[in-house]
């Protein structure tokens, strides 16, 4: 079985990610309700190595990884790849030049 | 300019085409390539249960696949996750972040028109060029790292499936016995068509059948599987430093896709029955 750590930690991180994704009304979303219900349902067990519990935890950890990676990927994309082309003014400014101001437009 | 709008294309995803503004299509649009970004046109996302399974509703409209079939999934949890993907889109819908939706569309439409046998064959074929079986001899530090990190996974797979795999430093790769391939073929045959689409996707992302099975059998986490798949890159990063806009970008994308694929497989192949044990006080 994969080394997952404490289920509570995964659970809290997952809820945090859902909050990031949904915004203010995250508690009304079906995802939030489903995660809450799933974790509550599997909490009560007499076995220390309950297989269903471990499967749920793995699934939760996987979904957490998905949400987190998508968010980080989107942030990186916005930062580095989403800005489009620079204007001629910006390009000139990169090397310290300014474009000439020609009265009456370009010749 | 068109190329300013292109995100770095990672196969099989085609580069995006800006909606309406480009007179020519220089990216060579394939037949099954949906647009990359469009405005969010719906307020509410909800789930409903139809005849074939669970459907997604964007306001009052039913979500459809690129081939105009009604989007129906067998698992409620999967439907909820897809609905969450749609609901978390802000001003524009970024299709390249909606991995679960894409996987469901692929399973529903089957655009490559492969049957179960062909999918399994494509998956097992990866074993011949499996990442964790391909070893270097130089530099010695990397060879050592590969031995320490990959050997345990290979021996886990050999023990779990009772097969011989081995590893190789030659350019031809390891010599996989036919019996090993047969074992994996019959194991994969136990999964349904949807789960197999997911498995083949994960294998294509990780470039390794062994790592994918290890992940699907819950032996390792997604983060670990991705790390092992990118072992040489991580080695080079540790030596030369990380370039955020390339390394981290690729890492996040690979993690997202692998996590989506794994979750998809598990949600498509599970039958959730909670066994209530009698409490004896």
Image (cartoon, coloured by chain):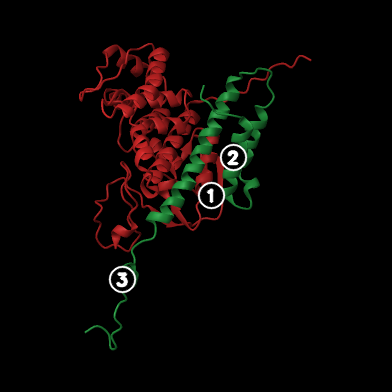
Chain colours: A green, B red
User: How far apart are the alpha carbons under marks 3 and 1?
Assistant: 41 Å
* Image position of A1 with respect to B260: above or below: above
User: How far apart are the alpha carbons under marks 1 and 2?
Assistant: 19 Å
Position of residue B185 in the picture relative to residue A21 (left or right): left
* Image position of B54 with respect to B184: above or below: below
Q: Are marks 3 and 1 in contact (CB under 8 Å)?
A: no
Q: Are marks 2 and 3 in contact (CB under 8 Å)?
A: no
Q: Which chain is indicated by disc 2?
A: A
Residue A91, how many percent across, how many down?
A: 31, 68
Callout count: 3
Q: Which chain is indicated by disc 1?
A: B
Determine the residue positioned at 64% across, 20% down.
B275
Marks 2 and 3 belong to one chain: yes
Residue hosting label 2: A13
Position of residue B273 in the picture relative to residue B242 (left or right): right
Callout in the foreground (3, 1): 3
Quarter where residue B23 is shown: bottom left
Residue hosting label 1: B87
Residue B192, how many percent across, how many down?
A: 42, 25
Residue B248, how many percent across, how many down?
A: 41, 44
Position of residue B142 in the picture relative to residue B91 (left or right): left
* Image position of B251 with respect to B153: above or below: below
């Amino acid at each position: 079985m994969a080394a997952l750590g404490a289920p509570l930690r995964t659970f809290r991180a997952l809820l945090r990610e859902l909050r990031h994704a949904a915004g203010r009304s995250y508690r009304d979303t079906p995802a939030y309700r489903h995660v809450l219900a799933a974790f509550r349902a599997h909490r009560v067990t007499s076995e220390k190595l309950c297989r269903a519990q471990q499967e749920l935890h793995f699934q939760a950890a996987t979904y957490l990884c998905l949400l987190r990676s998508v968010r980080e990927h989107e942030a990186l994309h916005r930062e580095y790849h989403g800005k489009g082309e620079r204007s001629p003014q910006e390009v000139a400014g990169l090397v310290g030049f300014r474009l000439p101001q020609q009265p009456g437009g370009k010749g | 300019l068109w190329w300013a709008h292109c995100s770095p294309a990672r196969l099989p995803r085609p580069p995006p085409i800006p909606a309406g503004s480009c007179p020519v299509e220089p990216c060579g649009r394939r037949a099954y390539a949906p647009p990359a970004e469009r405005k969010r046109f719906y307020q509410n996302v909800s789930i409903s249960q139809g005849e074939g399974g669970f459907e997604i509703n964007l306001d009052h409209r039913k979500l459809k696949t690129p081939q105009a079939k009604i989007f129906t999934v067998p698992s409620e949890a999967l439907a909820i996750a897809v609905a969450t993907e749609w609901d978390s889109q802000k001003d524009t819908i970024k299709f390249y972040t909606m991995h679960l939706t894409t996987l469901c569309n692929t399973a529903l439409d089957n655009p490559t028109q492969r049957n179960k046998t062909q999918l399994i064959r494509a998956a097992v074929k990866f074993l011949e060029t499996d990442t964790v079986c391909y070893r270097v001899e130089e530099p010695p530090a990397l060879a050592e790292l590969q031995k320490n990190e990959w050997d345990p996974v290979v021996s886990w797979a050999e023990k779990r499936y009772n097969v011989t795999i081995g590893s190789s430093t030659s350019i031809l790769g390891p010599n996989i016995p036919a019996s090993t391939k047969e074992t994996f073929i019959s194991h994969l045959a136990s999964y349904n068509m949807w789960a197999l689409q997911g498995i083949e996707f994960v294998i294509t992302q990780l470039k390794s059948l062994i790592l994918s099975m290890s992940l699907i059998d819950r032996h390792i986490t997604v983060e670990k599987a991705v790390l092992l798949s990118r072992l040489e890159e991580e080695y080079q990063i540790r030596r030369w430093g990380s370039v955020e806009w390339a390394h981290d970008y690729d890492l996040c994308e690979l993690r997202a896709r692998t996590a989506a694929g794994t979750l998809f497989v598990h949600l498509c192949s599970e039958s959730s029955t909670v066994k209530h044990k009698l409490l004896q006080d």
